[in-house]
């Protein structure tokens, strides 16, 4: 597979790549490094799985995958004690393994390198060139809207920038909520003599309640290790407006997961309601937007798919391997 073909595959399911010409140069390396950081702070859900699916694709294209289990970041964000966060980090790792990342994936705890002298020096240098206004723009959404945010919220983006250099990454992958921090890294890492990564941004999935983002803190998610009964119940209660495509989490799950695995989507229906359907992505969008497919039929199809799709994760978690 040549570089152009690899780029075409990488572009699938992404919102933007910054910058394409730099990506071509990275692909010329024998083993380029792609990284994503996850704050160990709750359940691993379908929102996380979007980036994991892209990491699996990059892995198949010859990338070395590094996953940062950002325990210090979670601590700065008030997500528990160090001991509690360590347990969550191990759970997160097992979920990622269950989702099918290859055995040579490198899982790295932030605390294993974030107190080193070179890393600390990088954070200090970044602190001297990053304005408070710019750092605030890179804070997470909750902190940005807090009337009295902690200093930790400003340190957080500086550390995340330093992470990319410390891990020698060629590609930084994340959802669109990571864009401000990744742009900060591209702006400031070269100013301290470090190489900036190519940034790839994937879409966010709406929460099951219709909220802009699926989130473990809001409880509007499907965890990758949810049992069959839980998946059925969550989907049954989920937001799925008749005829609407935009902002519909059921359509998004079909787009990001069903059609990334297969060309058509089978929706089973009783004969009295028209019988089974086998739809392409375009056909699903057209039929649903025209009101020719009932939300409950779509939900039933999504439920059946997710139960099968997430079965390997449930089995892996139950095996204790």
Image: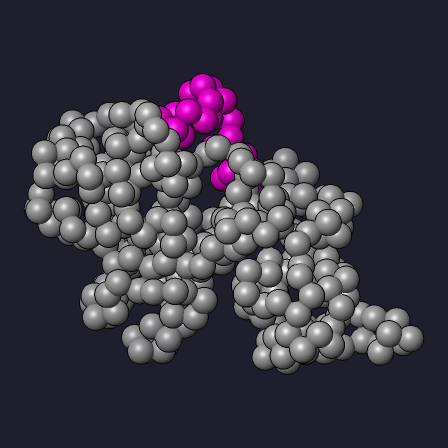
Q: Position of residue 275 (x, y in %)?
A: 84, 77
Considering the image in quadrants, where does the C terminus appear?
Answer: top right
| In this view, 155 is above or below 199 | above
Q: Which residues are magenta?
A: 71-95
Q: Is residue 221 left or right of residue 174?
A: right
Q: Is residue 179 in view? A: yes
Q: Is residue 86 in view? A: no
Q: Position of residue 317 (x, y in %)?
A: 63, 40
| In this view, 154 is above or below 6 | above
Residue at point 46%, 22% (across, down): 80
Residue at point 37%, 31% (across, down): 146
| The residue positioned farthest toward the front in the image shown | 147
Q: Position of residue 247 (x, y in %)?
A: 55, 60
Q: Is residue 80 left or right of residue 112?
A: right
Q: Is residue 91 left or right of residue 149?
A: right
Q: Is residue 210 left or right of residue 199?
A: right
Its colouring scheme is one colour
Magenta stretch contains residue 83: yes
| In this view, 246 is above or below 136 | below
| The residue positioned farthest toward the right in the image shown | 272
Residue at point 77%, 62% (across, down): 296
The chief SS type of the magenta part is helix
Q: Between 292 and 204, which is closer to the camera in this rendering?
A: 292
Considering the image in quadrants, where does the N terminus appear?
Answer: bottom left
Labels in figure, total:
0
Q: Position of residue 294 (x, y in %)?
A: 76, 68
Residue 122 occupies quadrant? top left
Magenta stretch contains residue 77: yes
Residue at point 38%, 70% (across, down): 11
Q: Between 111 and 203, which is closer to the camera in this rendering?
A: 203
């Amino acid at each position: 597979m040549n570089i152009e073909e690899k780029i075409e595959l990488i572009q699938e399911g992404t919102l933007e790549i910054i910058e394409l010409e730099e990506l071509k140069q990275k692909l010329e390396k024998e083993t380029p490094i792609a990284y994503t950081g996850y704050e160990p702070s709750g359940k691993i859900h379908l929102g996380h799985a979007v980036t994991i699916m892209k990491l699996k694709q990059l892995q198949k294209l010859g990338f070395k995958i590094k996953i940062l289990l950002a325990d210090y970041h979670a601590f700065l964000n008030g997500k528990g004690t160090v001991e509690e966060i360590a347990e969550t980090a191990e759970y997160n790792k097992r979920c990622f393994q269950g989702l099918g990342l290859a055995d040579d994936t490198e899982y790295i705890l932030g605390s294993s390198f974030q107190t080193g002298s070179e890393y600390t020096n990088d954070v200090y240098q970044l602190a001297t060139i990053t304005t408070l206004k710019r750092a605030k723009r890179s804070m997470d959404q909750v902190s940005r809207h807090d009337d009295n945010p902690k200093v930790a919220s400003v340190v957080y983006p500086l550390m995340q920038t330093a992470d990319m250099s410390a891990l020698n990454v060629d590609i930084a992958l994340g959802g669109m909520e990571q864009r401000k921090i990744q742009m900060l890294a591209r702006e400031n890492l070269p100013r301290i003599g470090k190489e900036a990564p190519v940034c790839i941004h994937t879409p966010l999935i709406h929460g099951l309640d219709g909220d802009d983002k699926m989130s473990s803190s809001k409880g509007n998610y499907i965890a990758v290790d949810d049992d069959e009964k839980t998946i059925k119940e969550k989907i049954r209660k989920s937001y799925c407006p008749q005829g609407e495509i935009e902002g519909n989490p059921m359509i998004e799950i079909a787009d990001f997961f069903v059609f990334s695995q297969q060309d058509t989507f089978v929706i089973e229906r009783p004969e009295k309601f028209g019988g089974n359907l086998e739809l392409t992505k375009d056909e699903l969008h057209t039929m649903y937007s025209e009101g020719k497919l009932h939300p409950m039929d779509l939900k039933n199809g999504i439920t059946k798919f997710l139960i099968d799709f997430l079965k390997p994760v449930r089995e892996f978690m139950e095996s204790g391997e």
